[in-house]
Image: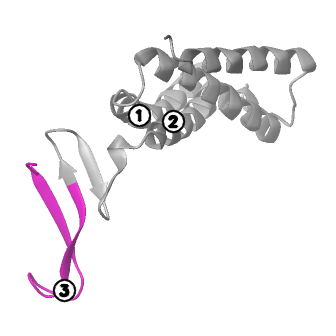
């Protein structure tokens, strides 16, 4: 395997004195290895990144609703700034996730994560809880996730 770039973090001084490899980047395959573990081939990394990106996006989409007195142009600019971090997480999540999931599975998983993040966000930020029909609708979407991961064989 060809490593395009290796980053050595040394413990105690110069080259050769207690140095060890902690972090390696594989540009050819887009891999990130930390302490010998390949994080980009993990099936859970995309889920974690999608969850974090959805937290940013939920704040960008709905956080401004508590600031209705602010100018719309300002709210849009702040939302774009927050959304930048969402994209920084979403793009790698989809790229690395495509090693383990189909694009359809990634999209449906992202939608389910969005709903879970939104319910938690709405509970803590707006102090509101979904009604029974909202919970039933979320259940239908979670069923869609199950169908998306069901083997077509």
Give the vertical position of 17 relative to 121 (above or below). Answer: below
Q: In this view, does 24 lie to the left or right of 105?
A: left
Residue at (40% x, 43% y) in the render: 42
Query: To which residue does mark 2 refer?
Result: 53
Circle nearer the viewer, 3 or 2: 3
Give the vertical position of 150 relative to 26 (above or below). Answer: above
Query: What's the CA distance linking mark 1 and mark 3?
Result: 35 Å
Examine the structure image and report whether residue 16 is included in the region drawn in magenta.
yes
Circles 3, 2 touching at the beta carbon (< 8 Å): no
x and y, in percent, of residue 98 in the image: 36, 26
Which one is in front, 20 or 84?
A: 20
Query: To which residue does mark 3 refer?
Result: 18
Secondary structure of the residue carrying tag 2 is: helix
Which one is in front, 81 or 123?
A: 123
Circles 2, 1 touching at the beta carbon (< 8 Å): yes
Q: Which of marks 2 and 1 is nearer the N terminus?
A: 2
Query: To which residue does mark 1 refer?
Result: 93
The magenta stretch is 1-24
Number of other residues with Cα within 10 Å of mark 1, as a class: few under 14, some 14 to 19, many 20 or more = many
- Residue at the outermost top position: 152
Circles 1, 3 touching at the beta carbon (< 8 Å): no
Residue at (56% x, 37% y) in the render: 51
């Amino acid at each position: 395997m060809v490593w395009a770039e290796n980053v050595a973090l040394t413990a105690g001084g110069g080259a050769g004195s207690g140095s060890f490899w902690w972090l390696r980047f594989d540009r050819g395959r887009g891999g990130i290895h930390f302490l010998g573990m390949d994080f980009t081939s993990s099936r859970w990394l995309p889920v974690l990144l999608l969850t974090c990106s959805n937290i940013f996006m939920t704040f960008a989409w709905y956080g401004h609703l508590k600031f209705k007195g602010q100018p719309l142009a300002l709210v849009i600019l702040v939302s774009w700034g927050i959304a930048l971090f969402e994209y920084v997480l979403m793009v790698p999540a989809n790229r690395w996730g495509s090693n383990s999931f189909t694009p359809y599975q990634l999209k449906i998983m992202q939608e389910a994560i969005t709903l879970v993040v939104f319910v938690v966000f709405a509970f803590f930020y707006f102090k509101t809880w979904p009604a029974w029909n909202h919970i039933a609708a979320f259940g239908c979407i979670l069923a869609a996730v199950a169908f998306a991961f069901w083997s077509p064989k």
